[in-house]
């Protein structure tokens, strides 16, 4: 009886349990259905919004029936072949400069908690990086160069093979990174510190730097997105990281470092700040990796490739052999340059009193001068376009891309160079009394030197890229070895023999850079791609004449405003407090002046450039296409296009400005599109 009662009880409990499980399953299913419904509603809303935006955008850029026919052949949006992708990538974040400036204004009172608090902080990073920099460079094997060489080419003909090159790079970086961390840490702890080396005082900083060698691939997917010419996503990653995430993480790290250093005299505020900002500057790289991974996965969906394939796929022998062989032809330069460069670093540290301060000043001056190198960003961003054209046999198309790169370079150079040389001293006169120590003032003499030295750089970059992507990396190896020897001599000559101080630091690499440029250009012309006199004559008006004349007018206007009008306007605000800053009232006329200067670019430089023949119908049409790709900047780039179009219509220089090379390039672009369409069809 008891057994029967027990069995009945167990059966009842089992039945109740099954009923409960059924209820739980039903609840789970209903929740799953509810989630899917919500996801479907969200996706439908997103697709409707996206469709409305595309309709509005196509109307804004005046998309025609012919454009839609071209979409079927060349691809649409960021998949469309043509130089408009490179231009749009350059202009994509321009519209974000305003929120970036607003964010920067709010960050101004916090400058005292960043590396600008002490001039020496930048020098600490240079010392820590210089000691083991040669080791890191050598063990990297220049494999990133192989990725840059092969991915753009195979993205057209064999996308899966292109990803194999990325996979090989990632796997090598991760394994070699483990070795680097182990070796450097042991060397610091058991050699440098016990020997009381002159570098022992930056031991903790050096250990942190070496930890960054694993996985050493946090920016790989961002670069790969650029190689696939989805410049919108690449530039958004850079914007989010550099303009928002990095300043905040470095600020947070700097504040924590200052607190620790203040309460621990063994560290001190300067070293605490140096290490804190360095750690903060590393944390943001994980944001780059996360967002890059997500967006790359969406791009690779078109090729039926998953992110996990990059990590898990077996690498074919022809891929790793060709990657290593390409890198091997660069390695003699890398090894030789690293070793001799380390020797030059030691000569500099031993013979330049106040090295950390001078190095920090010249580095910051170089960073400010990079404002002008924005103009070269479009050429630097053209490597993928050059490669897909040249390595698929489209020579005239490559020349047309080079012509456009030079055109946009000098178009921006005349704006940025004018601001950098003419306006910078006035900006520092405002900033130094309010936010920065007086020790930063020498930068105003350093920046114009960097700007003037930049003039030949776009031509050097073209030669360097063409020699590189044409499969002749050994030429850069030979040039690099000779340059390294020369740089070691000029390091001694400028810093030890002539005792030129900070000017010597700036000029050390210049003579051999010019030598390298001349040799690369000659080799490119003889063996890779000859740019004949007819080419230069064909592009001269658009690329050089129109921007130069327009820039000289702009320079005269800015000089008048800064040194004629501004001193009179600022007088009522001198001594006034503003935003809690003593004497901060001067910021009011300064901000107004900046707005006026920006408006002068829009309403004087742009119209004058177009009126003087800065466009022909084809290059203006390429710019029109790029407008639709500029995303968050379309509200700024579209009015620019309207200005260009209006004054181009009135230009008396249309015939002189026409680029005849564009006719041949258009035919080759059509052939390239057919090639890609056929290869994707096979996949």
Image (cartoon, rainbow, N blue to C red):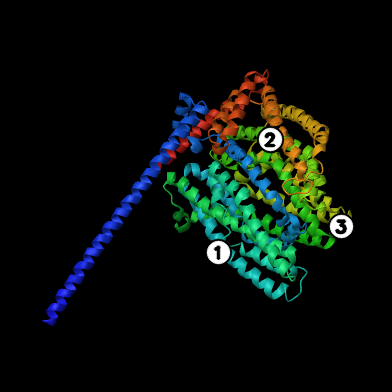
Q: Position of residue 261 (x, y in %)?
A: 71, 66
Q: Nearer the viewer, residue 338 or 243?
A: 243
Mark 3 or mark 1, which is nearer the start of the sequence?
Answer: 1
Displayed quadrant of residue 662: top right
Mark 1 or mark 2, which is nearer the start of the sequence?
Answer: 1
From the viewer's perspective, is 250 left or right of 628? Answer: right
Q: Is residue 148 above or below residue 91?
A: below
Residue at the location (44% across, 33% down)? 52
* Element under disc 3: helix
Characterize the local packing of mark 3: few (<14), some (14-19) or many (20 or more) Cα atoms within 10 angstroms: some
Q: Position of residue 603 (x, y in %)?
A: 68, 27
Q: Nearer the viewer, residue 285 or 600?
A: 600
Characterize the local packing of mark 1: few (<14), some (14-19) or many (20 or more) Cα atoms within 10 angstroms: some
Displayed quadrant of residue 624: top right
Instruction: State how far apart marks 1 and 3 are (Cα).
Output: 41 Å
Q: Is residue 19 above or below residue 93?
A: below
Instruction: State how far apart marks 2 and 1 are (Cα).
Output: 42 Å
Q: Position of residue 406 (x, y in %)?
A: 67, 34
Q: Circle 1 is placed at which residue position? A: 175
Looking at the image, do the residues carrying marks 1 and 3 touch, with CB atoms under 8 Å apart? Answer: no
From the viewer's perspective, is 603 left or right of 163? Answer: right
* Labels 2, 1: front one: 2
């Amino acid at each position: 009886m008891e057994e029967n009662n027990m069995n009945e009880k167990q059966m009842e409990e089992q039945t109740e349990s099954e009923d409960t499980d059924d209820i739980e399953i039903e609840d789970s299913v209903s929740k799953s259905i509810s989630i899917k419904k919500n996801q479907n509603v969200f996706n439908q809303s997103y697709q409707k919004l996206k469709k409305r935006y595309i309709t509005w955008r196509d109307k804004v850029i005046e998309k025609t029936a012919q454009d839609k026919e071209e979409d079927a052949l060349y691809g649409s949006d960021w998949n469309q072949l043509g130089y408009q992708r490179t231009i749009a990538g350059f202009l994509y974040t321009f519209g974000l400069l305003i929120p970036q400036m607003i964010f920067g204004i709010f960050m101004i009172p916090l400058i005292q908690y960043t590396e600008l608090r002490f001039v020496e902080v930048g020098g600490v990073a240079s010392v820590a990086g210089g000691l083991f920099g040669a080791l890191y460079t050598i063990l990297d094997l220049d494999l990133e160069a192989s990725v840059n060489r092969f991915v753009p080419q195979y993205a057209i003909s064999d996308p899966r093979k292109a990803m194999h090159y990325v996979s090989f790079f990632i796997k090598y970086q991760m394994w070699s990174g483990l070795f680097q961390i182990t070796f450097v840490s042991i060397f610091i702890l058991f050699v440098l510190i016990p020997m009381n080396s002159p570098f022992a005082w930056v031991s903790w900083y050096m250990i942190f730097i070496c930890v960054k060698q694993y996985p050493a691939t946090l920016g790989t997917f961002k670069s790969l997105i650029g190689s696939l010419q989805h410049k919108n996503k690449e530039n958004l990653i850079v914007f989010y990281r550099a303009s928002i995430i990095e300043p905040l993480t470095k600020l947070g790290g700097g504040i924590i470092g200052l607190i620790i250093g203040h309460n621990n005299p063994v560290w001190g505020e300067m070293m605490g700040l140096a290490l804190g900002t360095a750690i903060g500057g590393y944390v943001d790289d994980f944001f780059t990796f996360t967002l890059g991974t997500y967006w790359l996965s969406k791009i690779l969906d078109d090729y039926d490739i998953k992110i996990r394939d990059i990590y898990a796929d077996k690498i074919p022998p022809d891929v790793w052999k060709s990657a290593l062989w390409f890198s091997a032809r660069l390695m003699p330069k890398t090894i030789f340059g690293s070793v001799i460069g380390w020797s030059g670093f030691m000569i500099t540290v031993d013979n330049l009193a106040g090295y950390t301060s001078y190095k920090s000043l010249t580095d910051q001056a170089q960073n400010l001068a990079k404002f002008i190198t924005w103009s070269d960003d479009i050429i630097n961003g053209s490597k993928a376009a050059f490669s897909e054209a040249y390595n698929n046999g489209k020579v005239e198309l490559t020349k047309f891309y080079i012509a456009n790169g030079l055109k946009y370079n000098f178009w921006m150079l005349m704006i940025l160079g004018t601001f950098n040389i003419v306006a910078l001293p006035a900006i520092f006169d405002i900033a130094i009394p309010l936010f920065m120590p007086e020790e930063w003032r020498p930068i105003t003499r350093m920046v114009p030197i960097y700007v003037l030295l930049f003039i030949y750089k776009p031509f050097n970059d073209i030669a360097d890229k063409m020699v590189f992507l044409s499969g002749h990396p050994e030429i850069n190896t030979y040039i690099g070895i000779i340059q390294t020897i020369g740089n070691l001599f000029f390091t001694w000559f400028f810093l030890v023999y002539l005792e030129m101080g900070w000017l010597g630091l700036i000029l050390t690499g210049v003579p051999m850079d010019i030598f390298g440029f001349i040799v690369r250009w000659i080799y490119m012309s003889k063996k890779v791609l000859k740019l004949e006199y007819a080419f230069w004559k064909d592009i001269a008006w658009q690329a050089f004449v129109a921007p130069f004349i327009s820039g000289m007018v702009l320079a005269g206007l800015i000089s008048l405003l800064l040194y004629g009008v501004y001193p009179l306007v600022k007088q009522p605000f001198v001594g006034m407090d503003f935003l809690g800053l003593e004497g901060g009232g001067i910021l009011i006329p300064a901000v107004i002046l900046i707005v006026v200067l920006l408006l002068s670019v829009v309403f004087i430089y742009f119209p004058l450039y177009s009126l003087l023949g800065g466009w022909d119908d084809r290059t203006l049409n390429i710019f029109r296409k790029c407008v639709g790709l500029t995303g968050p900047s379309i509200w700024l780039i579209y009015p620019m296009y309207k200005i260009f179009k209006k004054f181009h219509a009135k230009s008396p220089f249309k015939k002189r400005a026409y680029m005849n090379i564009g006719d041949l390039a258009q035919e080759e672009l059509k052939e390239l599109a057919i090639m890609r369409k056929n290869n994707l069809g096979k996949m």
